[in-house]
Amino acid sequence: MNCQSQYLFVYGTLLNEQNEFGNYLEKNCEFIGNGKFQGILFDVGDFPGAIENLEEELWVHGKVYELKNFEMVIPILDTYEGFGEGEEIPNLFIRKHINIILPDKALICWAYLYNRPTNGFRKILSGIYKV
């Protein structure tokens, strides 16, 4: 049994089924529900970047998926998110376990969090990325 979390929280371009990787996620994972975590969502250009932040009363909203095949799906998404060996340093995103609040429970999920300075980027105060 794999001890890795089998859940993934997405909040940005992966929400878009027209996106090649969003479509891949939809086909290879099971949608669990809508969720959120306490943090800040930034508009960093062609995509959003989220960071955890417990000081401000802001939330990042997205969807939780169950990864049916972690070893197959995660390496593909890591490359898409610019995370891991062989990627630009510092990595654009880091993959980290975070606590996600769903309407009926909380889950520990993997999430790709922005890993570069956010100075000058506009906060998306609603916490919702419009795909």
Image (cartoon, rainbow, N blue to C red):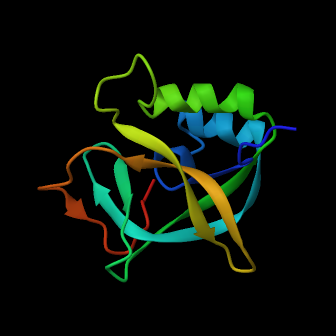
The quarter of the picture where the N terminus appears is top right
Find the residue positioned furthest to the bottom: 57
Q: How many labels does the image show?
A: 0
Query: Which residue shows up at 67% across the image and 39% down it?
Result: 25
Residue 22 in the image: x percent, y percent?
59, 40
Find the residue positioned furthest to the top: 86
Establish if 101 lies above or below 111: below
Query: Which residue shows up at 55% across the image and 70% down it?
Result: 36
For this rendering, which residue is in front, 118 or 53?
53
Query: Which residue shows up at 73% across the image and 76% down it?
Result: 105
Residue 51 in the image: x percent, y percent?
37, 59
Quarter where residue 90 is shown: top left
Residue 112 in the image: x percent, y percent?
48, 46
Quarter where residue 45 is shown: top left
Find the residue positioned furthest to the right: 1
Query: Which residue shows up at 44% across the image and 20% down it?
Result: 85
Residue 23 placement, left or right of 126: right
Residue 48 in the image: x percent, y percent?
35, 51
